[in-house]
């Protein structure tokens, strides 16, 4: 299950589960980490469990993790959307750097 689905389920029940919280604790399984296979070389340190090299992405992941109470669900949704946008921008930057056209 990806984090979009986890957030949707948490919104329905009004909270994240203990499993969700445990997965959010580690960079390898958090909302940022679900992208690690696609972007590992350009974004992550050499160790899979290390934090992302981007300070902005690290900050978004930390805010997402901190939003684990019922009042924080809306914040978690916002930060997840921000994380998704960050990766889309990174993909566009990589495409420009590599001389590829977006969508090609």
Image (cartoon, grey):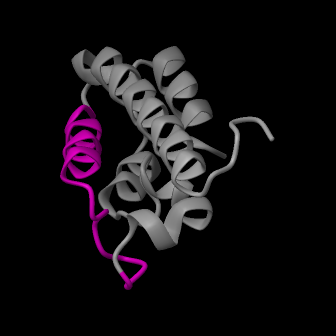
What x and y, as percent, mark residue 37? 60, 66
- State the residue at coordinates (47%, 36%): 89
User: Is 51 in the magenta?
Assistant: yes
Name the residue rendered at 34%, 76% in the picture: 45
Q: Position of residue 95 (x, y in %)?
A: 60, 48
Q: Which residue: 47% across, 60% down?
A: 29
Q: Is residue 20 left or right of residue 94?
A: left
Q: Taking 37 as reference, is 64 above or below it?
A: above
Residue at image position (69%, 36%) is: 102
> Is residue 89 within the magenta segment?
no
Q: Depth check: give the residue in front, 88 or 33.
A: 88
Residue 49 is drawn in which quadrant? bottom left
Quadrant location of the C terminus in the rendered image: top right
Q: Is 42 located above or below residue 87 in the figure?
A: below
| Horizontal and vertical percent position of residue 55 | 18, 53
Residue 21 left/right relative to 67: right
Q: What residue range appears in magenta?
A: 46-68
Q: Residue furthest front?
A: 99
């Amino acid at each position: 299950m990806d984090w979009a689905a986890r957030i949707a389920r948490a919104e329905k029940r009004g909270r994240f589960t203990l499993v969700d919280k445990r997965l959010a604790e580690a960079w390898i399984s958090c909302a940022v980490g679900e992208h690690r296979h696609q972007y590992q070389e350009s974004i992550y340190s050499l160790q899979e469990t290390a934090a992302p090299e981007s300070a902005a992405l690290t900050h978004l992941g930390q805010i997402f993790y901190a939003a684990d109470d019922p009042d924080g669900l809306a914040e978690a949704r916002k930060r997840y959307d921000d994380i998704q946008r960050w990766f889309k921008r990174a993909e566009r930057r990589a495409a420009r750097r590599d001389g590829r056209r977006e969508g090609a």
